[in-house]
Amino acid sequence: MTTEVDDASARISAFIRDPYPTLARIRDASAVSVLEYENGLPVWIVTRYDDVTAALKDPRLGQDVRGSQAIADRRAPGVVLGSDVVHMLNSDPPDHTRLRRLIQGVFTRRRVDAMRPMVAGLAGGLLDGLRDRDRFDVVTDFAFPLPIMIICTLLGFPPEDLHSYRTWSTAILTHGGATSFEQATTEMNDYLRGLMTARRAAPQDDILSDLVAACDAGDLTEQEVFAMVFLLLIGGHETTVNLLGTATLALLHHPDQLAWLRAHPAAMPMAVDEFLRYESPVSMATLRFTHEAVTVDDVEIPGGELVLLSLGGANRDPNRFPDPDRLVLDRNDPGHLAFGQGLHRCLGSFLGKLESEVALAGLLDGFPHLELAADEGTLPWRNTIMLRGLESLPVAAHG
């Protein structure tokens, strides 16, 4: 039996600020629940760790955006679930296999390890610029520019345009804001078309030049190049921005854990895994749909239904993680689902962890007396149930 979840309650500010009580209620009520999306469109949600893990690997759950949109068109005409351009996160094999193969070599562990000096240099430069300030914003002054500078370096994008990238990203991924989804995608397409023209005239040693070459060879369409860049640019910085902000807030909120990490700096890789579990930067995995009936525990989801997998809910499941609502930096359990599982496991997981380890180590080392410089209850969170991140985190730098 399923539990009906009022969609309105999942969108109020209380849920955005702290989704975990609601996710716990859903998780405790049933293996699968149903929430109501726009125009009454039903979406099934899975929140338990074992069930989410199995579903992430289940080929009966498709991710092709065309399939999801077709279901929405039948059930609630007028509801648009996102871009209809196919990329790695919203496609199934063979498209997914082809697209991932073109880019996966850039993000291997070996290639990422070689990026450590570059990441450390960029992080150090940003932190040096903050040392003389009594206050700064961890998100806007550090967590945002660092990963966007890194992914722009890999793509070959002009770093001076990074605020445009953030504007487009926010419009595409969240609700509201000054720039609409349509305006953001149009502006970004026009921008990319100009960069692609420049690369055809003068190729460089960067990802964009490789994608342009693949397009000219017939391995990618122009729209697939746009979609790939969208995914790398947005996915390549959004998750790390979110993690650095929530990890810093968690440390300030748990002074005992902050003291422990300062005393055990070599434990940063283990701590980052706990930050990923405690506040998963991607709270909901990409929307899926059932090709056929799928049974989750004792609940059957019929074929042709939309399904959300709650990574944040699974990572707080007490049947998998003891005392899951407590930050425990020496938990030493890397079994979180923050990067997903299966075919769609995050391609940039090695880079995201490296960025986070280097950035948090530099922040703690450079500012030994950090304090929160705002009422925690007033901190603004990203206005989306799909991502978990702060818009702003003001701190006092010198205690």
Image (cartoon, rainbow, N blue to C red):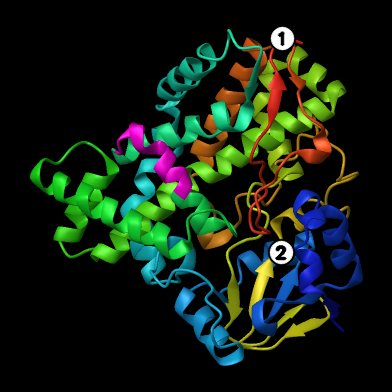
User: Which secondary structure lies at badge 2?
Assistant: helix
Residue 339 at x, y percent in the picture: 60, 50
Residue 132 at x, y percent in the picture: 58, 7
**Majority SS type along the magenta span:** helix
The residue at the point 71 percent across, 22 percent down is 395
State the extent of the magenta-drawn residues as a range: 157-167
Question: For mark 1, what is the residue?
Answer: 398
Find the distance from the CA under tag 2 to the CA under tag 1: 43 Å
349 vs 226, left or right, is right
Q: Which mark is residue 78?
A: none
Q: Quadrant of the C terminus?
A: top right
User: Where is residue 9, by image quadrant?
Assistant: bottom right
User: Where is residue 364, by image quadrant?
Assistant: top right
Q: Is residue 44 visible?
A: yes
User: Which secondary structure lies at badge 1?
Assistant: loop
> In this view, which residue lies farthest toward the front?
178
Query: In the image, what residue type sits under mark 1?
Result: His
Question: For mark 2, what is the residue?
Answer: 52
Residue 96 at x, y percent in the picture: 41, 66
Whichever of callouts 2 and 1 sits on the residue coming sooner in the sequence is: 2
> How many neighbours does mark 1 have within 10 angstroms: few (below 14), some (14-19), or many (20 or more)?
some
| Vertical position of residue 68 compared to residue 110: above or below | below
| Vertical position of residue 181 compared to residue 298: above or below | above
> How many neighbours does mark 2 have within 10 angstroms: few (below 14), some (14-19), or many (20 or more)?
many
Q: Nearer the viewer, residue 379 or 10?
A: 379
The residue at the point 54 percent across, 73 percent down is 81
